[in-house]
Image (tube, helix red, strand yellow):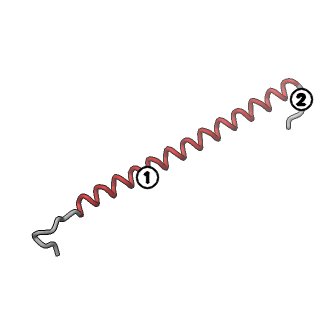
Amino acid sequence: MTWPFENDTSAVEKKLASRSIKADKRRSVFVILTIALAVCLMGTLCFLYSAQQMKTGGKIL
């Protein structure tokens, strides 16, 4: 029960909570995307290094 002299802040709390959840999801997606790009870059570099080694006739690692 809400008394006439009390402030009802439930709508504000719900709005702030939903904004926080959206920000957390956005941050998680950004982190996953960053990790995926880093893995892709490292894989590409390893592939290019091994291809260069095969081209010159050297042993691979």
Position of residue 24 measured from the top left corner of the image (x, y, whole percent): 43, 52
Q: Nearer the viewer, mark 1 or mark 2?
A: 1
In the figure, is residue 38 to the left or right of 55?
left
Q: CA distance from mark 1 to mark 2?
A: 48 Å
Judging from the image, what secondary structure is the residue with disc 1 in?
Answer: helix
Furthest residue in direction bottom, as rendered = 1
Note whether 56 is above or below 29 in the view shown.
Answer: above
Circle number at residue 57: none
Question: Which residue corresponds to the image point at 64% horizontal and 38% vertical from the top-left?
Answer: 40
Q: Residues within 10 Å of mark 2 (few under 14, many from 20)?
A: few
Position of residue 14 measured from the top left corner of the image (x, y, whole percent): 28, 60
Three-letter amino acid code at the position of disc 2: Gly
Three-letter amino acid code at the position of disc 1: Asp
Note whether 57 is above or below 27 in the view shown.
Answer: above
In the figure, is residue 25 to the left or right of 53?
left
Position of residue 8 measured from the top left corner of the image (x, y, whole percent): 18, 65
The image quadrant of residue 35 is top right
In the image shown, does 16 or 60 lie closer to the viewer? Answer: 16
Question: Which residue corresponds to the image point at 84% horizontal and 29% vertical from the top-left?
Answer: 53
Furthest residue in direction front, as rendered = 5
In the image shown, does 32 or 1 lie closer to the viewer? Answer: 1
Image quadrant where one finds the C terminus:
top right
In the figure, is residue 40 to the left or right of 22?
right
Q: Quickly name the residue at label 2.
A: 58
Do the numbered discs 1 and 2 sit on residues whose CB atoms are within 8 Å?
no
Question: Which residue corresponds to the image point at 74% horizontal and 33% vertical from the top-left?
Answer: 47
The image quadrant of residue 39 is top right
Position of residue 43 measured from the top left corner of the image (x, y, whole percent): 70, 37
Q: Quickly name the residue at label 1.
A: 24
Note whether 7 is above or below 51 in the view shown.
Answer: below
